[in-house]
Structures are given as structure tokens and as C-alpha cells.
Image (spheres, helix red, strand yellow):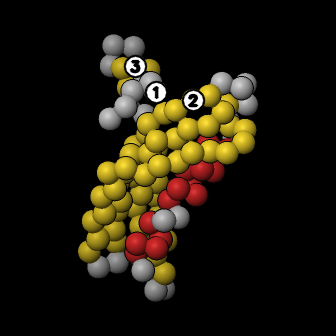
């Protein structure tokens, strides 16, 4: 079922966070949207990601995630994922200290 597969998305994002954090990683999903038709679907959401960087600095960042999913052989598989931060257009740099 598609909704059970969507629950795997935090594990994908956690894979990216584990590289830069120590200890537990907080991950909250907000504003989840899912569209599905036939054998394809996509989900988009905001994540509040928190943890302690390996340097000891506590951080909280908000990121947007989009995941494309396709049913193959009666199983829903993630075929594409994108994780992004908002940008400051004046400096073309990521903005990580904002909240939605």
C-alpha cells in the first residue's frame, strides 16, 4: 500500500543526516501531500530536521522533500528523490535558519 511506503521516506532523509550528525536525529514531517494515479505517485513535504552536528553544534533546519514513486511488480518503489533548502537569491546561498 502506498501510505506504508511513504513512511520509508524519513529513513531516506535520515541517511543524509547521519553523515553530519552525532547521536539522535529528530525528524518531523509536515504538510505531506500525495498524488497518485495508476502506477505512479509523488509526495512532497516539509521536514524539520534536528540534531547535534559532529562539531557539537545543535542545529534545526527545515527542508523540502519531493519523492517520486512507481509501482513495479506489485511493489511501490522510490524512483527519484529531491531534498532542498530555500535560498537567499541575493547571495545564491542556502537559508537554513528559517521556519515555515
- Most distant residue in the bottom direction: 74
Quadrant the C terminus occupies? top left
Label 1 crowding class (10 Å Cα cut-off): few <14, some 14-19, many 20+?
A: some
Residue 82 visible? The answer is no
Q: Name the residue rendered at 46%, 54% in the picture.
A: 81
Q: Earlier in the sequence, mark 1 or mark 2?
A: 2
Q: Secondary structure at mark 1?
A: loop
Separation of residues labelled 3 and 2 (CA atoms): 21 Å
Question: Where residue 48 sits: x, y (%)?
Answer: 46, 41
Q: Which quadrant of the view contains residue 22?
A: top right
Q: Which mark is residue 96?
A: 1
- Dividing the picture into quadrants, the one containing residue 21 is top right
Tell which of 83 and 53 is nearer to you.
Answer: 53
Q: Secondary structure at mark 3?
A: loop
Relative to 27, does residue 72 appear above or below in the rendering? below
Picture coordinates of residue 80, whole percent (x, y): 46, 58
Amino acid at each position: 500500500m502506498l501510505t506504508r511506503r511513504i513512511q520509508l521516506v524519513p529513513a531516506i532523509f535520515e541517511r543524509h543526516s547521519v553523515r553530519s550528525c552525532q547521536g539522535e536525529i529528530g525528524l518531523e514531517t509536515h504538510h505531506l501531500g500525495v498524488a497518485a494515479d495508476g502506477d505512479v505517485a509523488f509526495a512532497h513535504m516539509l521536514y524539520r530536521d534536528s540534531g547535534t552536528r559532529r562539531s557539537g553544534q545543535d542545529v534545526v533546519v527545515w527542508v523540502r522533500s519531493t519523492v517520486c514513486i512507481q509501482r513495479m511488480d506489485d511493489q511501490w518503489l522510490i524512483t527519484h528523490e529531491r531534498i532542498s533548502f530555500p535560498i537567499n537569491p541575493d547571495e545564491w546561498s542556502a537559508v537554513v535558519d528559517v521556519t515555515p
